[in-house]
């Protein structure tokens, strides 16, 4: 049976430390961390989850299993480029955005469209109607729906 | 040879009149109008283009050619649900957003990620770093790159 | 309103002449020719259709409108790689396969799954349960459902 | 780091016992079992893997995590309908087909196109140029590349 899965999205080398913290906290809470499987925020969130003994899924845009970063336990190779952003957020019961740019905006749009709970970790993209958290701890609490 | 194509995206019945105006102006300027092929803003933009003697393409999320609205000349059936939003904006040399909600936000994210020129017609979504137009005429001029 | 659309699929330089004939006959019968928008069979079918005064749609796997071959009137840029094969066949009321390899096999599978009428032009792939035609004329007649 | 992953594809209630055997043997060999996440052959392969203490991934066509069968450990929600077939086979280092129909044919086409090792378990689809196995044991050995 599928356990709780949380997608961590975003980009930007300057956001890696916070993404790693988010990944670690999610793993401590027993949630599987889903990411896009590549570098920067995606790699940091997976690294954080693995350091805390968690499980990670990477949903890749390309056609090669080898493209997954070293902290991915289970790689999914979609072959559909940026359209895999939909799969990343749809595969989370909730979504946490750390940093990010246009691709992250597309993911927030899709996640909200599908009714997934979305949390933007400060500082982050400005999107009206999306919950914001001021710390990794708060982001994870909002994502997992408890306090 | 493919001519100039402009994607018109968005949703909301209250925005149909402006979408129809945009579609008509694009057709008058010789641009093919690309939409998601369904109702509201998508149908209005196509209707406006057809009224002005233009050509329309509808890129559908489902699996049936029959789902296209009556103003679509050429229907493309993707079968990939919301992921077809990527195809809609990628198929335009430029993109004009009229109204819209979460799906439109995803489209603006993808269009910007792919380097397409994006114009939001006022009133519309608030997205930092995206050009805005106060009238259908201005939106079309910005999209087509002249003025 | 969307007219009759027929997808021409396949690959192999040695099949171009027959693909061009199929494209031409479809155009003479008033059908719009849908292809994957790139080279070989895809280009030949579109070239045949344009020579006969027809209309062509190219559904591209990449992210650039410029990738369409010169005989494409309307390019659709999906950005989803091989997954665009589904869109190519789904966008035809019927499908004609000319030559082809593994990608064509995937398309025949999808087209049959979606209930599209599929015709393999001899010589071509061996797929049990799919209609075969011994000439371009017969393929077009079978695809358009008359005689 | 991603371990060895094998996709089990196919359909047909009459093939469930053999799919369950394949799933069990793959798990015993330490391979993660990837399927389309729904019923019949997909459910049976996952059930077999779980019975043998293995790990399973289900790559779903729809938009809901809840659609995964009860033997899926990690569900990936693609939202792209039949186009998810590409992701299923691309996510395996090898692919084993058990029974199946048109969707399976599309998967065999895609898997071969991407250079994945494909094995059809007898009795199964007839596809020229694809390896065949006469037992679940042989299929797993061919898929994992030893013997």
Image: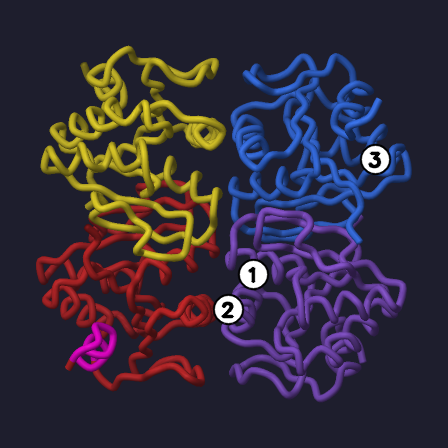
Chain colours: A red, B purple, C blue, D yellow
Give the Cα separation between the discs numbered 1 and 3: 29 Å
Judging from the image, mark 1 belongs to the subunit labelled B
- Looking at the picture, how far across and down is residue C78, in whole percent? 58, 51
Name the residue that disc number 3 marks. C49
The dot on residue A16 is none
Taking depth in this image into account, of A71 and C58 the one nearest to the observer is C58
Secondary structure at numbered mark 2: helix
- The 10 Å Cα crowd at callout 3, few under 14, some 14 to 19, many 20 or more, is many
The dot on residue B106 is 2
Viewer can see residue C21: yes
Secondary structure at numbered mark 3: helix
What residue is at 43 percent from the left and 18 percent from the top? D125
- Looking at the picture, how far across and down is residue D90, in whole percent? 38, 37
Taking depth in this image into account, of C97 and A74 the one nearest to the observer is C97
- The reply, left or right, for residue B40 in relation to residue A37 is right
Name the residue that disc number 1 marks. B85
- Looking at the picture, how far across and down is residue A64, in whole percent? 37, 40
- Looking at the picture, how far across and down is residue A22, in whole percent? 20, 71
> Which quadrant of the structure image shows residue D48?
top left
Label 1–label 3 contact, CB within 8 A: no
Span shown in magenta = A136-146
Tell me, yes or no, whether dots 1 and 3 are on the same chain.
no
- The reply, left or right, for residue A85 in relation to residue D145 is right
């Amino acid at each position: 049976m599928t356990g709780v899965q949380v997608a961590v999205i975003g980009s930007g080398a300057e956001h890696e430390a916070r993404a790693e913290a988010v990944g670690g906290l999610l793993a401590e809470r027993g949630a599987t961390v889903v990411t896009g499987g590549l570098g920067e925020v995606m790699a940091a969130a997976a690294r954080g989850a693995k350091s805390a003994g968690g499980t990670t899924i990477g949903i890749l845009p390309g056609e090669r299993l080898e493209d997954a970063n070293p902290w991915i336990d289970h790689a999914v190779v979609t072959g559909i480029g940026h359209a895999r952003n939909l799969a990343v957020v749809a595969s989370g019961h909730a979504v946490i955005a750390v940093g990010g740019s246009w691709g992250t905006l597309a993911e927030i749009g899709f996640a909200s469209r599908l009714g997934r709970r979305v949390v933007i970790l400060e500082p982050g993209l400005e999107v009206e109607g999306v919950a914001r958290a001021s710390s990794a701890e708060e982001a994870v609490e909002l994502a997992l729906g408890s306090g």
